[in-house]
Amino acid sequence: MDTAVTIIGLILTILIAIPLYFVFRGNRIKQKEIKAIQALHNPENKFDFEVTDQQNKKVFSIDKKHKAFLFIDFNSKDTFYKFFDLNQIVGCHMLYTTDQDSNTTVKIEFELLYKHLNQKEVFTVYDAKFDPMNQVCLFEDEKLAKNWRQKISSLLD
């Protein structure tokens, strides 16, 4: 009886421990990639990206003191990242793209407007082609984008 209970206990422990190991290992690898990309844009250790949010393979980081913003998207084959000096930005907006037939949102983008260069920088926050369960991530990504638009707008002059 004791041997059978011990064996069942070991099997259950292994069944739980193996997936947890791979989850924690994946998170450590992702954190190393994020730190490497942050270090790439911070060679003199000027910026301290103290506020960082991660969701659905997207990372938003901001340095409130030096007004810097970093966006990372791990959805594509090649990791997309964009660094912005918010001292050069005058406005931040969200752009929605909807499907004409179904009237559903298929893309949400951030648009940052530069002060001196009459130029816009646009990057995608939500894209339906990376949402495997069709609109499941939309609400979460839209909520996160609105929160970050507010954080960025509060730092603009």
Image (tube, rainbow, N blue to C red):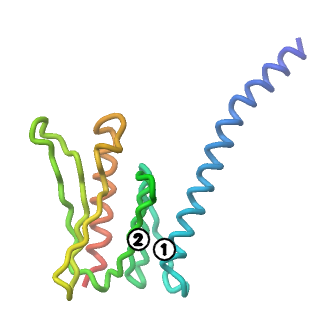
Residue at left 21%, top 61%? 94
- Residue 133 quadrant: top left
Residue 156 drawn at (x, y percent): 27, 80
What type is the residue that disc 1 sits on?
Phe
In the image, residue 68 sits, relative to residue 13, either above or below, namely below
**Horizontally, is 119 left or right of 59 in the view?**
left
Q: Tag 1 or tag 2, which sits nearer the N-term? A: 1
What type is the residue that disc 2 sits on?
Leu
The quadrant of the picture occupied by the N terminus is: top right
**Residue 130 visible, this angle:** yes
Residue at left 65%, top 36%? 19
Residue 99 drawn at (x, y percent): 14, 42
In the image, residue 147 sits, relative to residue 138, either above or below, namely below
- Residue 35 quadrant: bottom right
**Mark 1 lies on residue:** 49
- Residue 80 quadrant: bottom left
Q: Which mark is residue 104?
A: none
Local packing at callout 2 (Cα closer than 10 Å; few below 14, some 14-19, many 20+) is some
**Horizontally, is 55 left or right of 86 in the view?**
right
Check contact, mark 2 vs mark 1: CB within 8 A: yes
Residue 111 drawn at (x, y percent): 22, 67
Q: Which mark is residue 70?
A: 2
